[in-house]
Amino acid sequence: MGGNRLTYDRKPFLIRSWTEVSTGANGNGRFRMETEYRKDGWNMPMRLSGLMSGMDTESIIQQLVEAKKTKVTKAVKAQKTLKYKQDAWKDLNKQIVNLYNKSLTSLRYQSSYIKKTTKVSNSSVVSVITGENAMNSVQSLKVEKLAKSGYLAGGKLELKDENGNVVEDGTVTGSTKLSELGLGAGSGSIQVRIGNEVASLQIDENSTVDAFVSALRTAGVNANFDATNQRLYVSAKASGEKNDFELLGMDGQGVKALKALQLSYSSSAVTNKYDEIINNQVSTTEARQKSRLENLTSVWKSARENRQGILEKMDPEYIKKVNQALQDAGKSIQLDENTDYDNLTEADWEAINDAVETVFDKASADTISGADPDALEAAKAALGTWMGNQMNIESAEGQLEKNADGTLKTDSEGKFILTQQTKDEIAAEVQKEVDDAKAAKAELAAGGNSGQKTAGEDALIYLNGVEYKSDKNTLEINGLTLTLSATTAPGEEVTITTEDDTNGIYDMIKNFFKEYNTLINQMDKLYNADSSKGYEPLTDEEKDAMSDSAIEEWENKIKDSILRKDSVLSTVSGAMKQIMLEGVEVNGKQMYLSNFGINTLNYFISADNEKNAYHIDGDPDDENTSGNADKLKSMIANDPDTVVSFFTQLSQKLSDKMFDLMKSKEGYSSAMTVYDDKKMQTDYDDYTAKIKELEKKLADYEDKWYAKFAAMETALAKMQNNASAVTSLLGG
C-alpha cells in the first residue's frame, strides 16, 4: 500500500488527495480521491465526499447542521437587539445630562437672573459691556482723548558712497551696514527709555539694519524694517504715557547713527534729557559717589561675615592642607570644630588667607609640573568660594581710605570714606557723560532729523463730570466696561443707560423650555413608538439576500421601537413631568407654570408625542401661542422677585429629581446615567461568551456527521476493492 499523493488546484485553498487503497495483479494501484475545500482560511474545511455511495453527503450534513444552528442565530439576534437598545439609551442619556448640566443648572441660581443691559446714545464713540455689579442708572460721558501708543516713523533710508553722496536707485536691505548709510567710523551709544527702564545699545559703522532692529526689540519696543518702503518703524508695546518710549543718541556718534537710520528726531523730551545730564553734573557726581560708598560698605561687611561659613563648608581634605600651611608658616591657628572665629584677629584672618593661597599655588605648581594634572581644578572647586569672597573684600578695601595701621578710616558719623582716586574716577565718568550729552545735543541741533515721533497718550474721559484716565482705551468703572473708539464732538455728551435685562431673563427661561420640550417629546416618541413585532435583527446571510435600502428600512424599524413601553423610560419621563406639574410655594402661595402663562397645548390640538411640551404665551417664535398676552415678560418686568423665586425653586426640584435618577447603582448603572448601562454591558458580554460556546458545539456537531459519513465511504470503498480483487482472480 502506498502513501498519500497530493496535488493542488490553482483555485484558492482547493486540495485534492489520492490515497492508494490496493495494488492490482499488473502492479497498477487503485486510488481513492478525496477533496477538501477550505472556505474561510485553513481553519474552516468544507469536505466533499460521497464518491463511493453516490450520495450528496454535503447537503445532508448542512441540513442536519442548519436545524441546530437556530440556537446560535437566536443568540446573535438577541445580542444585536441589546446593542440597539444600548445605543438608543446612550443618545437619550446624553440629552438628559445636557439639560441637567446646562440650562437647568443656570435656572437654579439666583445669580443667573441678575442680568443688566446697557444702551448708549452714540455707539460710534463707546461700546459697553455690563457686569453683574452694574447699577441701574443714566449717565453722561465725554471722551476728551483716546489712548495712543508711542510711534516713531523713520525717513526713507538712502545708500551713500564713500564720499557721502546718495547712490541713485540704491536699495537698502537688512544686511546693509550703517557705513553704507553714511555713518563714519567710531562707536556710539543709543538709549531706549521706557518709563524708568533704560536699555543701552552700542552701535558702529559695521552694524547692520537687521542687527539694529533686533537690538531694539530686545530693548523692549516693537521694531520693523519695511523693505518695500525703505523705512524703519518703532512703536511702544502698549498704549499710554507710562508705556511711551524715547530713542536717544547718548553721544555725537549715537545721534549720527540715528540720523543715518533716519530715526533721529528732536523733541522737548529728548532735549530735556540732555539738559538734565548737563545741568545736574554736580548732583549726579555726589549721588554716584554716595551710591558707590554704600555698595562697597555692604559688599565688604557681607564678605567678612561670610568667611566663617565658607571655612566650615570647605572640603575636609583641604582644611587639613590649609592647617598644614598655617603650621608650616609658624601660626598657631588651626581650623576645626573648636575654632573660636569670633575672637580671631585681622592678622589671624590674613594668615588663613595666606595659607589658602599657599595651598592653591601648590596645586597650580603640581598641575604645571605634571605631578598632579587635576590638582588645580580640584583646588578651584574647594577653595574658589573663599578666594572669590576674599577678592570682594580686597576690592572694596582698595577703594576705601585706610588708617596707618591698615584698618579702614571712618568719618565723624562712623561711615567709611572713598579714596580720592575713586572719587575722581566717578567724577570723570560723569564728566564724560556730560560731554557726550553736549555733543549729542549739538549734533541734534545741527538738523537732518527725519524721524517723526508721536507721543504715547492716556485716554481721558469725564463720566458724570468725574475725570478718569487710562493707558488703554478700555476702562472698567462701577461694573461697566467701556471701550472707547472715538472722541466726542465739542459740547456732545453720550448717554449711557443701564437697566434690568428683561429679555435676558426671558430668553434664559425660554431656552430651558426649548431644551426640555425637545427631550420630553423625544421620550414620548420613543415610548409610544409603533410595534416592530415580527422584525428581528438580520443575520449576514439574510442581508446578502436584501438591498441596502431594504436593510436600512428593516433595521430602522427595530431601532425606532427599541424603547417602546420601556419601564425605565416611563419612570424617568414620568418623574420629570410630575415635577413640572406640581408647582412651588412663593410667599405663602402655591404657584404653577400656568401662573406665568406657560402651559401645554390642548390635547386635541397638540401634535402626536408633543402633548407634554410647554408653550409660553406671547412667544413670537411659537405659532400656537404668539397671539396670547405675554404674561411671563410682564411679570419679569413688574414682579421679578416672584419670577426668580418660582423658577429657582422649580428648577431645583427638577434638578434634585434628575440627580436622584442618575445616581450610580452598584452593578447596574454608572453615575450620571438614568439607565442600567453596567447591567446591559454585562448582558452583552454574556451573549458574546454564549455565542462562542454555541458555535463550538455546532462545529463539533458538524464534524461528528462528517466523520460518520467518511466512515461509511471508507467501508463502501473496501467492499468495492474486495469485489474487484475477486473479479480479477476469476479472470474478469
Image (tube, helix red, strand yellow):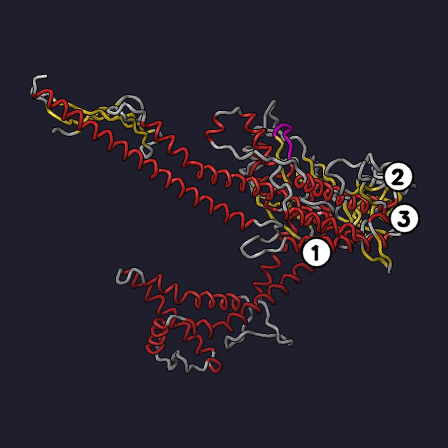
Mark 3, other Cα within 10 Å: few <14 / some 14–19 / many ≥20: some
Sequence-first tag of 2 and 3: 3
Mark 1, other Cα within 10 Å: few <14 / some 14–19 / many ≥20: few
| Residue sticking out furthest to the front | 730
Quadrant of the frame with the N terminus: top left
What is the magenta range?
Answer: 227-232
Quadrant of the frame with the C terminus: top left
Sequence-first tag of 1 and 2: 2
- Residue 464, numbered circle: none
Mark 2, other Cα within 10 Å: few <14 / some 14–19 / many ≥20: few
Label 3: which residue?
138
Describe residue 608's horizontal placement relative to residue 686 as left or right. Answer: right
Can you tell which quarter of the image residue 202 is in?
Answer: top right
Is the stretch drawn in magenta largely helix, strand or loop?
loop
Label 1: which residue?
656
How far apart marks 1 and 2 lie (CA) works out to: 32 Å
- Residue 628, numbered circle: 2
Establish if 702 lies above or below 195. Answer: above
Q: Which residue: 83% across, 58% down?
A: 585
Across and down, in percent, residue 178 comes to 57, 35
The residue closer to the viewer here, 547 or 616, is 547
Q: Magenta span has 707?
A: no
The label nearer to you, 2 versus 3, is 2
Q: Amino acid at mark 2?
A: Asn
Sequence-first tag of 1 and 3: 3
The residue closer to the viewer here, 29 or 464, is 29
How far apart marks 1 and 3 lie (CA) works out to: 41 Å
